[in-house]
Image (tube, rainbow, N blue to C red):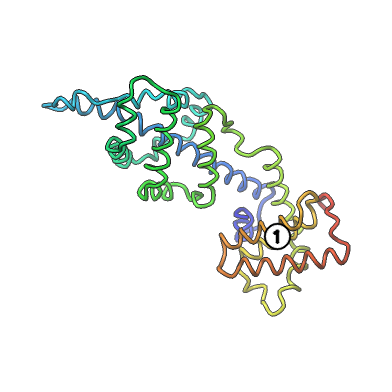
Amino acid sequence: MQTLYTVFALENEVKPGEPQKLLQQHFNQTRSLLVYLLYFLSEVPRYAEKDAHKRAGKHLPNAADLNVNIKISGNELLWKMLEDSGLNEQFKTEKPELKIDNELLRKIYLSLVETQEYKTYTAQPGREKTEEKKILEFILNDLLLDNELFVSHIEENFSNWDDDGEMVVQLLTAYLQKPGSINFKIMLSADKEQFAKSLLQTVLDKNEHLQTLIVPKLKNWDPERIAHLDMIMMKMGVAEFLYFETIPPKVTINEYIDLAKDYSTAQSGQFVNGILDNIHKELTQEGKMQKVEYKKG
């Protein structure tokens, strides 16, 4: 949807292969967001060593300065993450350290050490697997994702946070269950990536035909005054009706109602629902809902 919006908004003629490159950029942005969240999360417990070094280096350190508890910097789950060659490769490529706000990192670490969760964690002798994971999950959920300053920092650096945030957090949470479980080079499964590319190309190739099916259903609406995003979503929906045999029409309609509600105007969900439902009924009555595989031509 975002790629189509960009392509249709371009005044110049789009070069062959350009839409697919734009789509790939969206996939890359998702990876960059995930890598950065993992980097920031790993830096919070590691800050304990920096804090200990700083405080010990004071001109007149007191007993507390000389006895900073650095247990969390040796967190076993943290080090499994840092030993993941795939993640390390992404750190080298993405260079997340260039985006990090060190003052924000310091504040989050200092707020961590004041929490009861941290005090309980550091007071326990030894390392329990469940406790090692629990403290990292606490940092992620309570000190990062529930922190307005941190979320603002992410929004400033990643324009895709609103779109991808929920999915990326799910990936990150799954990664904490099993470090090393993500192939960072393949953010989508092969079938999902192929579907995205096929849907993009189908809408571009069949744009005029899709338009001829939609415009008659607009009644008193001027096509030029329809929200640009609504028209794109309707074209995507009709393309799924006609060219993607495995997707049930109900699934298509519900998906684009949700997208319209989330991304377009307050009335868009009902509007898109009405148009797609009418087109679906007409295609069914005319026997055109064959759900044949899309072929260019």
The residue closer to the viewer here, 229 or 146, is: 146
Q: Quadrant of residue 288?
A: bottom right
* Residue 232 placement, left or right of 182: right
Give the mark count. Answer: 1
Looking at the image, the residue that sits furthest to the bottom is 220
Residue at (79, 53) in percent of width and height:
243
* Residue 215 placement, left or right of 89: right
Tell me residue 99's x, y (percent). Answer: 39, 40
Residue at (42, 42) in percent of width and height:
141
* Residue 107 placement, left or right of 14: left
Mark 1: secondary structure: helix
Tell me residue 33's x, y (percent). Answer: 49, 42
**Quadrant for the N terminus in the image:** bottom right
User: In the figure, 6 relative to 270: above or below?
Assistant: above
Which amino acid, mark 1?
A: Ile
The residue closer to the viewer here, 128 or 297, is: 128
Circle 1 is placed at which residue position? 253
User: In the figure, 220 relative to 128: above or below?
Assistant: below
Tell me residue 42's x, y (percent). Answer: 41, 32
